Structure formats: structure tokens, C-alpha cells
Image (cartoon, helix red, strand yellow):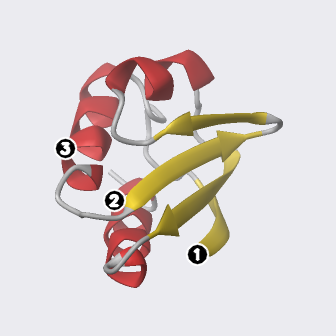
């Protein structure tokens, strides 16, 4: 299992379209992937879970991955949420 803290740099945070792209990217990996904001941890492969966190730009979140491709999963998701539009 690997985890890292990262700041969301997307202009609109992880809302609607960006949340859908994030979930789509998370589903590319076999590993279990979670996103945690404060004390709330959700499955990163669930659009409803991601939307429930209401993540705005500048928010610090924790990405957690567990599985055979956990490092690739974290790398791909970090690139996505740190992309400055």
C-alpha cells in the first residue's frame, strides 16, 4: 500500500467533469484506489464518492493505492489533479 498527500491544482477542483475524468483514470488500474479529504475516505473509482468530498482548488488530499499497479495508479492520478489548466 502506498499513499501520498497532494494539493489539487485543477482550476475548478474535482467538480463534475474533472471528477469524471479522475474516476475514469482511477478505473484504468487494477489496484484499489482511495481519496481522502480530512477524515472522509472514499473509493476513487466512484463518481458519487468523489463528488461527495466537494474538493476545491488548493485543497490538500491524500491518495491511497493498494495493489499490483499501485505506484502507476498514484503517478497517473497525481498528474491529473496537479494539472494547472
Q: Residue at position x 48%, y 24% from top?
A: 49
Q: Which residue is mark 1?
A: 1
Q: Residues within 10 Å of mark 3 (few under 14, many from 20)?
A: some
Q: Earlier in the sequence, mark 3 or mark 1?
A: 1
Q: Is residue 71 above or below residue 76?
A: below
- To which quarter of the image does residue 75 belong? bottom left
Question: Which of labels 1 and 2 is toward the front?
Answer: 1
25 to the left or right of 4: left
Residue 26 or residue 21, whichever sits in front: 26
* Distance between mark 2 and mark 3 Cα atoms: 11 Å
Q: Earlier in the sequence, mark 2 or mark 3?
A: 3
Q: Earlier in the sequence, mark 1 or mark 2?
A: 1
Q: Secondary structure at mark 2?
A: helix
State yes or no: discs 3 and 1 in contact (Cβ < 8 Å).
no
Q: Is residue 7 above or below residue 74?
A: above
* Distance between mark 1 and mark 2 Cα atoms: 20 Å
Q: Secondary structure at mark 3?
A: helix
Q: Which residue is mark 2?
A: 80
* Count of numbered labels shown in the rendering: 3
Q: Residue at position x 82%, y 36% from top?
A: 39
Residue 34 at x, y percent in the picture:
52, 49
Q: Residues within 10 Å of mark 1 (few under 14, many from 20)?
A: few
Residue 52 at x, y percent in the picture:
55, 17
Q: Residue at position x 41%, y 56% from top?
A: 32
Q: Which residue is mark 3?
A: 24
Q: Residues within 10 Å of mark 2 (few under 14, many from 20)?
A: some
Q: Residue at position x 49%, y 68% from top?
A: 66
* Distance between mark 3 and mark 1 Cα atoms: 21 Å
Q: Secondary structure at mark 1?
A: loop
Amino acid at each position: 500500500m502506498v499513499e501520498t498527500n497532494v494539493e489539487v491544482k485543477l482550476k475548478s477542483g474535482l467538480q463534475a467533469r474533472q471528477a469524471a475524468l479522475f474516476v475514469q483514470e482511477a478505473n484504468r488500474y487494477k489496484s484499489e484506489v482511495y481519496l481522502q479529504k480530512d477524515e472522509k475516505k472514499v473509493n476513487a473509482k466512484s463518481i458519487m464518492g468523489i463528488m461527495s468530498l466537494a474538493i476545491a482548488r488548493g485543497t490538500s488530499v491524500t491518495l491511497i493505492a493498494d495493489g499490483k499497479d499501485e505506484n502507476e495508479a498514484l503517478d497517473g492520478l497525481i498528474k491529473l489533479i496537479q494539472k494547472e489548466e
